[in-house]
């Protein structure tokens, strides 16, 4: 029997980036959504007339720019309140600002801040995120509870540390407790909320983890089929210390490789100072890189050689890396991804500068692929899940658009406006699996419902 549940039609300028450097756009376009999935994308003229058994409920606006939902593949929930703190580099910053903050992220705070954080993500146009919590089971558990309530698509895990941790457990108990707690959280939450929630084993980085912890985390991730997230090669002093601590390893990447941490389910934050050998290992193992350009500039960590990573065949997505990155705003992260390669190009003429279409790909289809979700998220291809971010052109334009001939703007112009001026003030609505999280500023005023 054919379903007569109405479909939802979104009309506006529709833009996606199915390949690196390839933009698809329908200037007066439409996306049809049914049962939480993309039914069809195309021009409004064509889709508006096409006969279907089901009625379409149209949401039309000449201000809407419609993108696949933005995907943040690296951020830290407990750190949001300490953004923009400190002037030192990574290790000093962790000890002075991050560990004291995470130390208090236990108990009910996980519920309260969790709920606030997920609505912040949506308000910024992010529909999927891969997130670290703190070292505690209780706050991570409550954050998952809040994630389930939020309806967002969340990959998350308890941060694991058994070296130099800020926790107060007796040293001989730390490892076994961390493993037990992470396993419990994984069993409880992985694939919950109809698959919107997933667990990520999250050993913090080589300087905070014993080899046994890393190896056990890798084994459990494999056993449960979940993700692994950690930090790799972010800061020169960090890299130097890893070299001394793990003198048998070929390099930093080899520390993780020997522990079994590298595979297609692995998300590696930063990866700035990699050798060609390390790049080849990441490409070969299928591990993904979370490129966090705003964080890399904030902590003076360096500029990740994006073109070299991509040329080596490594999967790359973008991360806000709050609180090293000062904002959850992925449009700012895209802008920073462009501008940091521009800065590199001033001293090296061989550096290629990514285009707006290329960084949009990194924040959507590229990120989806990095998370192993390239066939269900990232573009408007029919059958994919309807995770969508709708931006408000008027909120992006000077004078609210009154001095701009809007009909002359191309999709490329609109994408550039989002990247250079986008933020929560211009997010109209997000959808996760077809369910709306309406936001902004009097959304209803600008949208005609039929
Ligand atoms: N390396 C280890 N932990 C962290 C963290 O919390 N933030 C960043 N940016 N790098 C790290
Ligand atoms: Zn991080």
Image: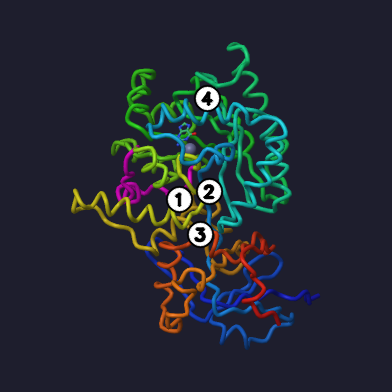
Tell whether label 2 touches label 3 (CB within 8 Å). Answer: no
Q: Which residues are magenta?
A: 301-321
Helix, strand or loop status at disc 2? loop
Q: Position of residue 23 (x, y in %)?
A: 42, 69
Instruction: Give the class, few, some or many, for how many residues have Cα within 10 Å of label 1's Cα (few <14, many ≥20).
Output: many
Residue that lies at the very extreme toward the front in this rendered image: 399
Q: Which quadrant would the N terminus be assigned to in this image?
A: bottom right
| Image side of residue 250 versus residue 267, left or right | left
Q: Nearer the viewer, residue 166 or 30?
A: 166
Helix, strand or loop status at disc 1? strand
Residue 371, disc: 2
Disc 1 residue: CB within 8 Å of ligand 2: no
Residue 215, disc: 4
Q: Position of residue 279 (x, y in %)?
A: 34, 40
Residue 317, disc: 1
Instruction: Give the class, few, some or many, for how many residues have Cα within 10 Å of label 3's Cα (few <14, many ≥20).
Output: many
Picture quadrant of residue 78: top right
Please, is residue 426 above or below residue 6 in the view? Answer: above
Q: Earlier in the sequence, mark 3 or mark 2?
A: 2
Query: Is 69 colored magenta in this rendering?
Result: no
Q: Residue at x 43, y 80 (%)?
A: 403
Q: Earlier in the sequence, mark 4 or mark 2?
A: 4
Mark pair 4, 2: CA separation: 21 Å
| Image side of residue 235 versus residue 425, left or right | left
Q: Nearer the viewer, mark 3 or mark 2?
A: 3
Q: Earlier in the sequence, mark 4 or mark 1?
A: 4
Q: Earlier in the sequence, mark 4 or mark 3?
A: 4
Residue 423, disc: 3
Picture quadrant of residue 181: top right
Disc 2 residue: CB within 8 Å of ligand 2: no
Q: Nearer the viewer, mark 4 or mark 1?
A: 1
Mark pair 1, 2: CA separation: 9 Å
């Amino acid at each position: 029997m054919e379903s007569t549940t109405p479909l939802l039609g979104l009309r506006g300028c529709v833009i996606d980036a199915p390949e690196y450097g390839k933009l698809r756009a329908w200037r007066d376009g439409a996306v049809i959504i049914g049962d939480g999935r993309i039914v069809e994308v195309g021009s409004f003229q064509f889709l508006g007339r096409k006969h279907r058994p089901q009625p379409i409920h149209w949401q039309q606006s000449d201000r809407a720019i419609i993108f696949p939902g933005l995907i943040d593949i690296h951020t830290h929930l407990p750190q949001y309140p300490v953004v923009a703190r400190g002037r030192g580099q990574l290790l000093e910053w962790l000890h002075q600002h991050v560990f004291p903050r995470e130390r208090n992220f236990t108990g009910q705070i996980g519920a309260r801040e969790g709920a606030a954080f997920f609505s912040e993500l949506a308000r910024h146009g992010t529909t999927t995120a891969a997130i670290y919590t703190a070292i505690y089971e209780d706050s991570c558990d409550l954050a998952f509870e809040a994630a389930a309530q939020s309806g967002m698509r969340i990959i998350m895990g308890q941060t694991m540390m058994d070296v130099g941790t800020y926790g107060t457990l007796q040293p001989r108990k730390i490892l076994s407790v961390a493993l037990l707690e992470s396993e419990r959280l994984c069993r409880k939450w992985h694939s919950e909320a109809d698959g919107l929630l997933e667990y990520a084993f999250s050993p913090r980085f080589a300087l905070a983890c014993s080899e046994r912890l890393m190896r056990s985390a890798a084994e459990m991730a494999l056993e449960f089929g979940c993700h692994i997230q950690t930090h790799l090669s972010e800061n020169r002093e960090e890299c130097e210390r890893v070299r001394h601590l793990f003198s048998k390893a070929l390099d930093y990447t080899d520390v993780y490789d020997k522990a079994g941490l590298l595979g297609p389910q692995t998300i590696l934050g930063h990866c700035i100072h990699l050798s060609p050998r390390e790049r080849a290992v990441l490409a070969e193992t299928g591990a993904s890189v979370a490129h966090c350009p705003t964080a890399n500039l904030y902590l003076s960590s360096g500029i990740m050689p994006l073109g070299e990573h991509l040329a080596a065949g490594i999967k790359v997505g973008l991360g806000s890396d709050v609180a090293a990155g000062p904002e959850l705003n992925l449009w700012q992260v895209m802008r920073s991804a462009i501008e940091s390669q521009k800065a590199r190009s001033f001293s090296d003429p061989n550096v290629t500068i990514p285009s707006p279409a290329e960084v949009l790909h990194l924040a959507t289809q590229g990120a989806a692929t990095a998370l192993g979700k390239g066939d269900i998220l990232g573009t408007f291809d029919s059958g994919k899940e309807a995770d969508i971010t709708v931006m408000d052109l008027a909120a992006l334009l000077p004078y609210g658009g009154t001095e701009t001939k809007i009909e002359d703007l191309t999709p490329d112009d609109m994408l550039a406006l989002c990247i250079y001026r986008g933020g929560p003030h211009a997010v109209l609505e997000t959808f996760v699996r077809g369910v709306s999280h309406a936001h902004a500023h009097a959304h209803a005023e600008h949208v005609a419902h039929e």
